[in-house]
Image: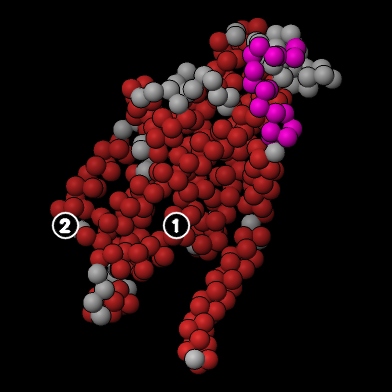
Amino acid sequence: MTTTTGTASGPRALARQRRRASAARFWRRYRAERAGLYGLTVLALCALLALCAPLFVGADVSSVTDAPGRPMQSPSAEFPLGTDQFGRDLLGLVVWGSRVSLLVGLLAAVLSVSIGTLIGITAGHFKGWYATVMMRITDWFLVMPTLVLAIALATVMSRSLTTIVVAIGVTTWPTTARLVRAQTLAVETRPYIERAKALGGGHWHLMSRHVLPNVMPLVLAQTTLIISSAILAEATLAFLGLGDPAIVSWGGLLQDAREAGAVSAGDWWYLVPPGIAIAVVALAFTLCGRAVESVLNPRLGVSR
């Protein structure tokens, strides 16, 4: 009994040890990417701020009836970023809006990468007519303007966060599908794939146990890059009035500022904070994505 238990726990312990060593190696290489560390620090602060937003500002910050100030007040000691057209504290709105913008960006990126990974792996594995059809569909999505497709979907569906996530996710997957398919084709030429086939491994076994683990580093890097694009897309759709007007987001604040005439009136405090927040978070995700790419593929760092 002791021998059996020791034998069973040995491989699991070895696997855990390898995973820990791999994670430590990844973090050691990532720390050498200074830009990636800056981006990660900014994202950690933004995530902490978003999680603690109910403690800092409270859910009633978006209430129009209980607004604490006068409409369109300029920045002051009481309201560091001024107030909006309803007299609400803009600092509190920007903090609260980070929850929605980050959540939508993350969910949309996960949906996009999931679709792209599924299509990329299956098209690279099965080949034949299936791969031809999938790649032609992918090409069609690639040549069509992503924003136009997202606007069309958001227009015909109900105005909600789910609509925004779906509209972004189902229109931004083609690049991931192309990259994952190319990686899948490369992985399936390796000798251990042939050995797995000879031992009776089925399609699901090959794709889930051999192909997917080898494309996951690419998927991880692609996810961090798509999140920044998804945040920008969410802000654009909200700015165009296609988001849920009852939910505060950075793009929604820009839309409110446009409707209130902040541009023509010169009320910069209504426009600048949410715009800077969008730009900073998008840049931080991009820096993290580039750093992950450089760590997972050292040749990229050499070429730079």
Name the residue nearer the viewer: 132 or 91: 91
Q: Among all residues in the image, which is located at the extreme left?
A: 129
Q: Residues within 10 Å of mark 2 (few under 14, many from 20)?
A: few
Q: Percent position (x, y) of residue 304?
A: 55, 55
Q: Quadrant of residue 255?
A: top right
- Bounds of the magenta segment: 53-69
- Look at the numbered disc 1 and give the secondary structure of its residue: helix
Q: Quadrant of residue 218?
A: bottom left
Q: Is residue 151 visible?
A: no
Q: Is residue 202 visible?
A: yes
Residue 10 position (above or below residue 45): below
Q: Are marks 1 and 2 in contact (CB under 8 Å)?
A: no
Q: Which residue matches tag 1?
A: 218
Q: Is residue 60 magenta?
A: yes
Q: Is residue 15 magenta?
A: no
Q: Among all residues in the image, which is located at the extreme front?
A: 1
Residue 34 position (above or below residue 105): below
* For marks 1 and 2 on the same chain, the one whose residue lies earlier in the sequence: 2
At 55% from the left and 74% from the top, the residue drawn is 16
Rendered image coloring scheme: secondary structure
Q: Percent position (x, y) of residue 284?
A: 61, 43
**What is the C-alpha distance between the residues marked 1 and 2?**
24 Å
On screen, residue 22 versus residue 268, left or right, reads: left
- Look at the numbered disc 2 and give the secondary structure of its residue: helix
Label disc, if present, on residue 168 of the rendered structure: none
Q: Which residue matches tag 2?
A: 128
Name the residue nearer the viewer: 56 or 155: 56
| Residue type at tag 1 | Leu
| Residue type at tag 2 | Gly
At 68% from the left and 43% from the top, the residue drawn is 48
At 38% from the left and 29% from the top, the residue drawn is 150
